[in-house]
Amino acid sequence: MKRAFFVAGAIGLAGIVAGCSQPQRFGASPPGLAPSAAPAPTVMTKRIVSDGAGGLQLPDGTRVQTDQSGGFSLPNGAYVRRDRSGALNLPNGSRCVPDNQGGFVCP
């Protein structure tokens, strides 16, 4: 008799659990519920700004002095060259373009 109650209880519990879950539906969204667009990727930019004394302040706060060509040496000894268009060419291949405010915008 105990066994019969145990089996009946287990079957009833399984039925309750199955009834509480909803089947997965794939495909179109329900009417009136448009799919949301994926968020646009955030573009991170860094700025190199003029320090007002003939030098530049890098994004990490380091100040560097520019030479006659407009380039400068980084604290690690690498050289940042300024090209004919006025952009800075970083040692890692990135290019920082003038921002028309005396500074540069870098990727």
Image (cartoon, grey):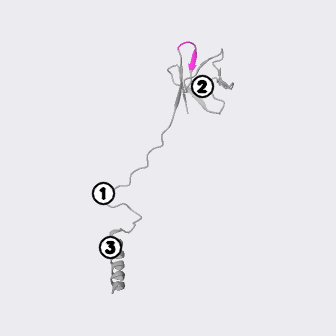
* Residue at 36%, 82% in the rendered image: 7
Left or right of 19? Residue 85 is right
Question: Is 102 located above or below residue 16 in the figure?
Answer: above
Question: Which residue matches tag 1?
Answer: 32
Classed neighbour count for the residue bearing mark 2: other residues with Cα under 10 Å, few (<14), some (14–19), many (≥20)? many
- Percent across and percent down for residue 34 are 35, 55
Element type at mark 1 = loop
- Percent across and percent down for residue 2 are 34, 84
Residue type pointed to by label 3: Ile
Name the mark nearer the viewer: 3 or 2: 3
Comes first in the chain, label 3 or label 2: 3
Residue farthest along the left direction in this orientation: 32
Comes first in the chain, label 1 or label 3: 3
Q: CA distance from mark 1 to mark 3?
A: 31 Å
Q: CA distance from mark 3 to mark 2?
A: 68 Å
Question: Is 92 located above or below residue 39 in the figure?
Answer: above
Marking on residue 16: 3
- Percent across and percent down for residue 76 are 67, 26
Residue type pointed to by label 1: Gly
Element type at mark 2 = loop
Comes first in the chain, label 2 or label 1: 1
Task: Identify the magenta region.
Answer: 52-56
Residue type pointed to by label 2: Ala
Classed neighbour count for the residue bearing mark 3: other residues with Cα under 10 Å, few (<14), some (14–19), many (≥20)? few
Residue farthest along the top direction in this orientation: 53
Quarter holding the N terminus is bottom left
Marking on residue 90: none
Quarter holding the C terminus is top right
* Residue at 36%, 73% in the rendered image: 18
